[in-house]
Amino acid sequence: MKELNFDAAVIGGGAAGMAAARELDAAGFSVVIIEREERLGGILGQCIHNGFGLIEFNEELTGPEFAERMQERIEGTGIRTFTGATVMEMDARAEIKTLYCYSASLGVLRLNARAVVLAMGCRERNRGNIRIPGDRPAGVYTAGLAQRLVNIEGLVPGKNAVIIGSGDIGLIMARRMSWVGCKVHAVVEILPYPSGLTRNIVQCLNDFGIPLYLSHLTTRIIGRERVEGVEITPIENGALMHEKAFVIPCDTVLLSVGLVPENELSKGAGVELNPMTGGPMVDSMLMTNVPGVFACGNVLHVHDLVDYVAEEARRAGANVARWLKGAKPAREARLKSGPNVRYLAPSRVDLDGDNKLYLRTLIVKNGASLEVKVNNRVVKTRKLAHIQPSEMITVELGPKDLESAAGLPDPTVEVAIV
């Protein structure tokens, strides 16, 4: 078993992993990226549609182009990369963390590091997670798998498709499947509003005349050997209207029913997880409850834009560098999700530094207001023209915003939407 030592190890070579590693390298620390795929970039490699990079690069890029730009930033640096290597176990109990990695070409690696950055991204929820009744016929895919089959493998999953869930991957695949000659008969969403970005509703459904059934539940997948159709039941006033159920014939079903942070490795290392996001609980430095273990990107909470992933990961990398030099937040306050806020990330704020918070709302509303309170006293407000759960909201808080928390024994900062 080969053993190597680094100041920091980054698990995951997507946008988050590369951005965090670049910050650590720039600060003069030795860093390694471990990526289970054969190349860096993560899921971006199969996302051939545009819409990436408008914030990070001030230019509209495809997913592979965004990944290439990120790779260019780490070329010529001292960052060590191991691709085709999977971290199977992490021992984070001691001051020096140990990662055990398996690689077809390199064998077993033992990597030791003073700090670890979790940047493993997320995975799709599947049929087992949502328990759709019916047999187990061929032709049922997650939208991301279908995306890989079409964009990477050059295979078309079927000729007549129904997409369950209106997440962004499903919306994008509605357009992509239409382009390769598949008839997409409908997108079915259980909620009364879409789960994806508005631009994807317009560009991927409206422009192609694909119906979107809101407040409808897929109550059965029909077919024994191959999918033959799906039964769709409307929801009215919270109740299933079985007498109004109808069947859409199809041979393919794509599931776009949400993403889950990849945190099996985190749990095994004793990292506390947030029940609302499925990602780690982190402080204002993006450090978990395990000292020296940090998290960023979609493994922390599912972002709507990869640009935000890179932005958050840069802060994580900079914070790891500060921590390796001995820095700690001087004073912190606990963050609380107020009315109409589903979650906040991170879980704490630094009262003496600059903070950037990410949150998702529980409601769809025009003309909303965001309020920040310190122990029930409003310290900051902001008008929001339109909000919906699919679009992330960011908030910046500095020492002046939080100065009223000075001297309080256990201050709480609450963010609400009214």
Image (spheres, grey):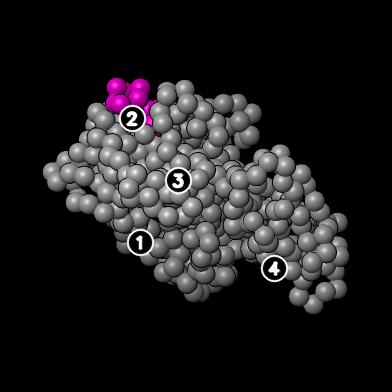
- What type is the residue that disc 4 sits on? Arg
Q: Which mark is residue 184?
A: 2
Front: mark 3 or 4: 3
Residue 177 appears anywhere in the view: yes
Indicate the secondary structure of the residue bearing disc 4.
strand
Range of residues picked out in magenta: 173-183
Indicate the secondary structure of the residue bearing disc 2.
strand
* Residue found 57% across the figure and 47% down from its top: 389
Is disc 1 surrounded by few (<14), some (14 to 19) or many (20+) residues within 10 Å?
Answer: few
- Mark 2 or mark 3: which comes first in sequence? 2
Is most of the magenta stretch helix, strand or loop? helix
* Residue found 55% across the figure and 70% down from its top: 290
Question: Alpha-carbon distance for marks 1 and 3?
Answer: 41 Å
- Mark 2 or mark 1: which comes first in sequence? 1
Query: In the rendered picture of this protein, how many numbered marks are placed on residues?
Result: 4
- Mark 2 or mark 4: which comes first in sequence? 2
- Mark 3 or mark 4: which comes first in sequence? 3
- What type is the residue that disc 3 sits on? Ser
What percent of the width, then of the height, locates residue 105? Answer: 28, 48
Front: mark 2 or 1: 2
What percent of the width, then of the height, locates residue 66? Answer: 51, 32
Indicate the secondary structure of the residue bearing disc 3.
loop
What percent of the width, then of the height, locates residue 317? Answer: 61, 52
Question: Alpha-carbon distance for marks 3 and 4?
Answer: 36 Å
